[in-house]
Image (tube, rainbow, N blue to C red):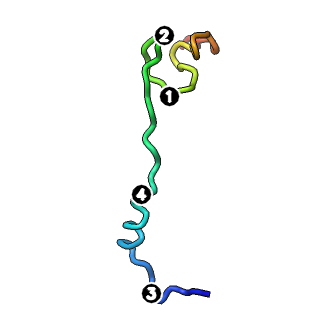
Amino acid sequence: MAVPKRKTSKRKKRARNTHKKAPAINIQACPKCGAQKRPHRVCPECGFYAGEQRVTKKDS
């Protein structure tokens, strides 16, 4: 079984892991109200998705 001869330094470890990061979150405008929302999700402001009212809007 292979065993490392030396401890991997922080610099070497971080250089190897630089490409491992979370992808950027896509944001788009809601076609109904113009609020910012994530794609393929119900709009949190108006409750519309795919041109239909899916969720009733909560009054604060």
Q: Position of residue 1 (x, y in %)?
A: 62, 87
For the residues marked 2 and 4, what is the alpha-carbon distance in whole angstroms? Answer: 37 Å
Mark 2 and mark 4 lie on one chain; the one further toward the N terminus is: 4
Q: Position of residue 9 (x, y in %)?
A: 39, 77
Look at label 1 and name its amino acid. Answer: Arg
Position of residue 46 relative to residue 4, above or below, is above
* 10 Å crowding of disc 3: few (<14), some (14-19), many (20+): few
Residue 32 is marked as 2
Look at label 3 and name its amino acid. Answer: Arg
For the residues marked 2 and 1, what is the alpha-carbon distance in whole angstroms? Answer: 14 Å
For the residues marked 3 and 1, what is the alpha-carbon distance in whole angstroms? Answer: 46 Å
Mark 1 and mark 4 lie on one chain; the one further toward the N terminus is: 4
Q: Residue at x 51, y 27 (%)?
A: 39
Q: Residue at x 38, y 73 (%)?
A: 12
Of helix, strand and loop, which one carries label 4? loop
Of helix, strand and loop, which one carries label 2? loop
Mark 3 and mark 1 lie on one chain; the one further toward the N terminus is: 3
Look at label 4 and name its amino acid. Answer: His
Q: Report the side of 56 relative to 60 (left or right).
A: right
For the residues marked 1 and 4, what is the alpha-carbon distance in whole angstroms? Answer: 24 Å
* 10 Å crowding of disc 1: few (<14), some (14-19), many (20+): some
Residue located beneath label 3 in the image: 6
Q: Residue at x 50, y 28 (%)?
A: 38
Q: Quadrant of residue 51?
A: top right
Disc 3 and disc 1 in contact, CB within 8 angstroms: no
Disc 2 and disc 3 in contact, CB within 8 angstroms: no
